[in-house]
Amino acid sequence: MTDVREALMTGRKSDGTAVRRPLSPHLQVYKPQITSVLSIFHRMTGVALSAGTLLLVWWLVAAATSEGAYATVSGFIRSPIGWLLLFGWSVALWFHFCNGIRHLFWDFGHGFELPQVHASGKAVLVATGVLTLLTWIVVIAF
């Protein structure tokens, strides 16, 4: 008995050559595009911001608890791993913020033409870099 799914997984390219395809298109089928990549990063940065907030909560609880607890958290935050986490959190914050503004424009029906989508996506990336850099210049200067 033949499996019906095998027939569904066989197709032809536009030039007529046979191709084996999955039942449902997924990430392995699509080429990364700025729209899909930014959408995935928007979700990832949302999760990263939630996880990074745990560091903020740890810091606040330690500050309210004792000088020893606060010193422990401060030591961790000032370590190379702490700085890396804070840098990543700031990138996630600015990307999520800028891409959220982009989504607000979409909610009002603006920017759906493909050239505008690509331009706003690139603007989000540039703004993320600039705002992150400015943030860290201020952090290091003070």
Image (tube, grey):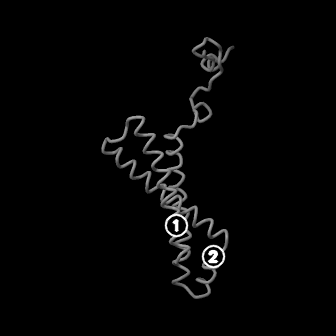
Residue count near mark 2 (Cα–Cα under 10 Å), binned few <14, some 14–19, many ≥20: few
The percent position of residue 126, horizontal first and vertical second, equals 49, 52
Report the residue at 39% width, 52% height from top: 101
Left or right position of 49 against 3: left
Between the residue at mark 1 and the residue at mark 2, the CA separation in whole angstroms equals: 17 Å
Disc 1 marks which amino acid? Thr
Q: Which residue is mark 2?
A: 78
Q: Earlier in the sequence, mark 1 or mark 2?
A: 1
Q: Which residue extends farthest top?
A: 16
Q: Residue at x 55, y 65 (%)?
A: 52
The residue under label 1 is 53
Query: In the rendered view, would you say 103 is above or below 142?
Result: above
| Residue 99 place in picture, x, y as percent | 44, 51
SS category of the residue bearing label 2? helix
Q: Secondary structure at mark 1?
A: helix
Closer to viewer: mark 1 or mark 2: 2
